[in-house]
Image (cartoon, rainbow, N blue to C red):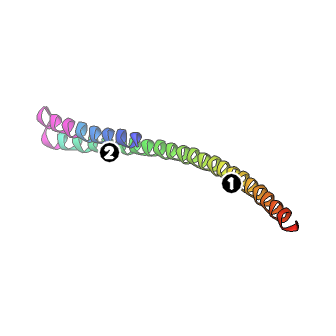
Amino acid sequence: MENSKNTGKIIVSLVLGALAGAALGLLFAPEKGSKTRQKIADDAEKMANDFKKKVKRQAKGLKKSMKEEAMALKNKATKLENYVENKVEKEMATLKNKAETLLHMNSDHTVK
């Protein structure tokens, strides 16, 4: 969950930085309008490609982290299942012994 929040912050920061850079580029451009527009378009394309790469990298990291967490959760569930199964088997054995004892006690009383 924490990783998801960080990813969101990174994405927002990248977008805001790109917008600020584009605005400053327009304000302080020393070249003709057509050259400036082309430069902005090229820079925007480069930023978009960089952004895509960063998002893909973040997504891969998040996917890996989620797989690891899922595996850890599965292992914990398996351990819990084994623990509960052992407890139930022990309790069943105890109850069986008690029932057999009661049956023997009852049969001893009815024979007399």
Quarter of the image with the C terminus is: bottom right
Quarter of the image with the N terminus is: top left
Q: Is residue 78 above or below residue 20?
A: below
Between residues 81 and 8, which one lies in front from this camera angle?
81
Between residues 38 and 79, which one lies in front from this camera angle?
79
Q: What stretch is highlighted in magenta?
A: 19-34
Amino acid type at image mark 1: Val
Q: Distance between the residues labelled 2 and 1?
A: 58 Å
Q: What element carries label 2?
A: helix
Disc 1 crowd rating (10 Å Cα; few below 14, some 14-19, many 20+) is few
Q: Where is residue 6 in the image (x, y as percent from the top left)?
A: 36, 38
Residue 102 is labelled as: none
Residue position marked by numbered label 2 in the rendering: 48
Q: Where is residue 7 in the image (x, y as percent from the top left)?
A: 36, 41
Amino acid type at image mark 2: Ala
Q: Position of residue 5 (x, y in %)?
A: 35, 41
Q: Is residue 49 above or below residue 107?
A: above
Q: Is residue 1 magenta?
A: no
Between residues 35 and 7, which one lies in front from this camera angle?
7
Q: Decide which of tag 2 and tag 1 comes sooner along the chain.
A: 2
Disc 2 crowd rating (10 Å Cα; few below 14, some 14-19, many 20+) is some
> Relative to 92, is 10 on the left or the right?
left
Q: Where is residue 82 in the image (x, y as percent from the top left)?
A: 68, 50
Residue position marked by numbered label 1 in the rendering: 88
Q: Residue at x 83, y 61 (%)?
A: 104
> Relative to 78, is 7 on the left or the right?
left
Farthest residue in the left direction? 27
Q: Residue at x 16, y 34 (%)?
A: 24
Q: Which residue is drawn at 78% across and 55% down?
A: 97
